[in-house]
Image (tube, helix red, strand yellow):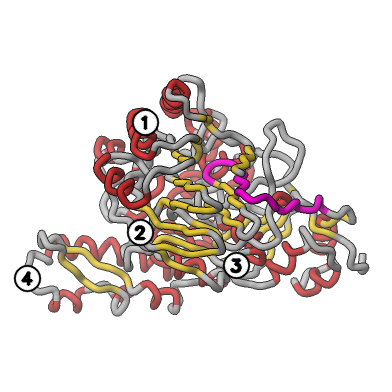
Amino acid sequence: MSESHYYLKPNVLLEPLFAGWYAWPHLISPATAAMNVLHRHLTIMDSFIQAPHIHAAAVKNPRMLGGPFMDHPEDRVDEVAQLRDRTARDQAHLIEFARAVIELGRMLEERATGYSMEPLYQSVPGPLRGYVELLYDLDNQPSFRFFEPLLYRSRYYDRERQSIALSVIESDQRPFVLSTPKLDEPGTLMLEIPFEDPRIDDLFAMRYQAGDPEAVGESLDLGKNQFDVFRGFFTDQPPTAFQRYTGSGIRTRYFGHACVLVESRDVSILIDPVISYTYPADVSRFTYQELPETIDCVLITHNHQDHVLLETLLQLRHRIERVIIPRGGGGALQDPSLKLMLRAIGFAEVIELDEFDEIELPGCTITGVPFVGEHCDLDIRSKLCHHVRLAGRSILFAADSCNIEPRLYRYIHREIGDVDVLFVGMECDGAPLSWLYGPLLTEPLARDKDHSRRLAGSDFSRARDLVRQFNPSDVYVYAMGQEPWLTYIMSLTYTEFSKPIVASNQLLEYCRDEGIVAERLFGEKELIYG
């Protein structure tokens, strides 16, 4: 296999791992990683070790999908116990850090009573000394922020715990990754290399360009048994050539959830990349094969695992010219910096965009638009909708923004005017705050309060008001998490009676009555605007 005319198979799966768990943005930033190790990973592993039969029963119940239940059989309890012991040993410094965050919160609650914070710096727990600034807001409520760049330069950013798992994927069925660690499996190659490693780029460039698997394998320091698995990832069949758009207008391709590729003859923009693999499936979809050789920019709307998917980003890093992200919140625990994270994992050009900032590309203007809702009323600034002007068309990608204050969108309309196409998210049930942000809380939240603060998008009336405000000719409901290849990160299942389906059906009916083209996107969709 030493000849250089082999290609990486289109269904080779890359799973980024942190200390054995599927890596998502909150496992990259040191502070949020520490809180998740303590309050998510250890908690779930302890629960599984004590009662694996409860987990085995829960993962078979559709109503429990997305809960804190590990999707491993009971006979793997010893392996989970070993992982738990390794975590307690190898991540002791992060566990200590997380406990210090809790201690700091309690200290401030008791002792920060409106007087100067200066004496309290001596009482900051040791692991946090020099890494935090103590603050009051204008109502004299105490808080703190991290000097996050310093954390990335400290022992709390642990590249040695980063690794990737390579395997061949043949169906949409995958365990829910926030509650299930990765254990060794036949046919899976576990590589102890950090996410920033350029060898990942070399490997996934072979999905499109012929290369020599033996040379790549040698660069990865594979042993003989590992190489026996590795050679199964390659084929001598070249991929289907990508057909670049050459028209005078734009081509828009929907890849599932909130992932949309927008192309003119001069520029390509990929929004919230979450890409499926190529294998026989019931639901048609665009895959990595339908992406251009060079992606001029990736737009990120917000820092949730279904919009910043490291699995996809790492495989495309060698094709991406720049990543455009919302400007972050400046050290708040709940709002880790996307810029620091992306640079740490190997993205060279990362551009922060603020509200109403503009980026110019050939024949294109991208404007950051305020994003409200869907973040459980937490002070999170790393979120933007995007208004794209390209080839004479005006498109608004509203993502999961929830129209909770219509006046805001009146003011936005005053700035950007009517749009031709509106993409709007309507996942209007939404998980409660604790589902995603629970590990970051220093004190538990009462159940009724927790369930009142949800990760929800617009319902019918709010989405209808957006349509009325921006007067689009086309409306597309997206970011619904319906595609079967998303359940491993979304854990959503809908019926015809589910609130998001009922609400979006109402919007489609309203639009059609108004003479507006409207569709709830699912699977794949190509739109040409000449």
Residue situated in front as seen by the camera: 90 or 259: 259
**Which comes before the other along the chain, label 4 or label 1?**
4
**Which comes before the other along the chain, label 2 or label 1?**
2
Amino acid identity at mark 1: Arg
Badge 4 is on which residue? 115
- The magenta-colored residue range is 239-258
On screen, residue 477 versus residue 370, left or right, reads right
**Residue 251 magenta:** yes
Kindly indicate whether the residue at mark 1 contacts the one at mark 3 (C-beta within 8 angstroms): no
Q: CA distance from mark 2 to mark 1?
A: 23 Å
Amino acid identity at mark 4: Tyr
Foreground disc of the pair 2, 3: 2
**Which comes before the other along the chain, label 3 or label 4?**
4
Query: For residue 209, which quarter of the picture?
Result: bottom right
Residue 459 is situated, as x and y percent measured from the top left of the image, at: 37, 31
**Which comes before the other along the chain, label 2 or label 4?**
4
Helix, strand or loop under label 4: loop
Name the residue at 46% across, 45% down: 47
Helix, strand or loop under label 3: loop
Residue 362 is situated, as x and y percent measured from the top left of the image, at: 56, 63
Helix, strand or loop under label 2: loop
Name the residue at 47% across, 41% down: 420
Amino acid identity at mark 2: Phe
Foreground disc of the pair 3, 1: 1
The reply to whether residue 76 is visible in this rendering is: yes
Taking 513 as reference, is 12 above or below it? below
Residue situated in front as seen by the camera: 433 or 277: 277
Foreground disc of the pair 2, 4: 2
On screen, residue 277 versus residue 515, left or right, reads right
